[in-house]
Image: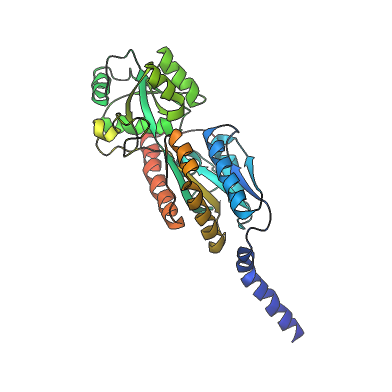
Amino acid sequence: MLLRALLAVALASLVFAPAASAADFPNRASRLIVPYTPGGNTDILGRVIAHELNRATGQPVVVENRPGAAGTIGTDLVAKSPPDGYTILLASFGNILTAGALYKGLPYDPVNDLTPISLVATPQTVIVINAKLPFNDVKGMIAYAKANPGKLNYGSSGNGSSNHLFGALFASMAGVQMTHVPYKGSGPAVSDVLAGNIQLSFAPFPLVMGHIKAGTLKPLAVTGSVRHPLLPNTPTVAEAGVPGYEAVGWFALMAPAGTPKAIIEQLNQQVNRIIALPEVRAQLAQEGAEPVGGTPEEARRSVAEGAKKWGDLVRRLNITASM
């Protein structure tokens, strides 16, 4: 009888442990893993979220940069961490939406090994060209590309990166041939557009706004579904001649699969509160990003839809990358 009683207590503790931990969450420091180097856009966004989570909960939230292998090292760390809410990931386009299709031997499943907490933001890019090129809009660019197959070179931050795939999607939907030139970052790609070594780039807003204002780069279109306040007179790609085109970056907070629902919901509420703050929205706007938020279920659907859209493109065009 004593053995049975002890067994019953042990089983009860296993059943109720997640609920108990969720009830007083958080009661110690937690980690926000940013799978890229310090100082970049992802890192800056992660530090804003960590600071506001710390203010809201009274517990330290430490940003831990774990760069390497195109963001997959830090993502794998979170996927294999205890599902208790104390280690979360600032996930992005490359390590979640395209990783499964791009990389052989990926050590985690982006869909099944991680649980979405909330969408955070979807940054647009802007198609910029060297100011000396003989066209001024997307239709002119398409006509030039058709008259000069393969002679339009577009730079990206690397093979399989978001702005590589944004260009590949454009070429596919517009029915043109463009040559992709990968760089070690968007900065060098934009520099070569300015120098005339390549013709265009699907570039992040912060890198090119100064050049656009100076007249050394011409903006042809933004890649989202709506015009951006930073460039209100610049049409979307869909408006400018490629109906149905939409390509935006993607940031979300994710936790290890199996994290208790109560903890996920608590974190989700905090994220939605944070991205509604005027100062956070203003900072995101300067990055060309639209704050999103929403429920964990909406974030989960976004993962599934994004992985299908971009994974299908990667497989159809046989795009590969190394970690």
Q: Which one is in front, 124 or 9?
A: 124
Does residue 208 appear to the left or right of 236 in the view shown?
Answer: right
Q: Residue furthest bottom?
A: 1
Q: Residue furthest front?
A: 278
Relative horizontal placement of residue 1, taking residue 56 as reference (left or right):
right
Residue 104's place in the image compared with 180, above or below, is below
The mark tally for this picture is 0
Q: Where, quadrant-wise, is the C terminus in this rendering?
A: top right
User: What colour-coding does the image apply?
Assistant: rainbow
> Could you say which quadrant of the image residue 212 lies in?
top left
> Image quadrant for the N terminus?
bottom right
The residue at the point 33 percent across, 38 percent down is 246
In the rendered image, the residue lying farthest to the right is 2
Question: In screen coordinates, is 229 left or right of 157?
Answer: left
Identify the residue shown where x is 63% and y is 42%: 63
Q: Is residue 85 above or below residue 242?
A: below
Please say whether residue 55 is visible from this viewpoint. yes
Residue 163: x, y in percent? Answer: 42, 31
Q: Nearer the viewer, residue 303 or 160?
A: 303
Q: Quadrant of residue 266?
A: bottom right
The structure residue drawn at horizontal position 70% and vertical position 77%, both measured from the top left corner, is 9
Report if residue 287 is visible in the image: no
Q: Position of residue 88 (x, y in %)?
A: 58, 50
Q: Nearer the viewer, residue 99 or 41?
A: 41
Query: Is residue 241 depicted above or below 274 in this figure?
Result: above
Query: Residue 69 placed where, x, y %?
Result: 57, 35
Determine the residue positioned at 53% across, 37% down: 42
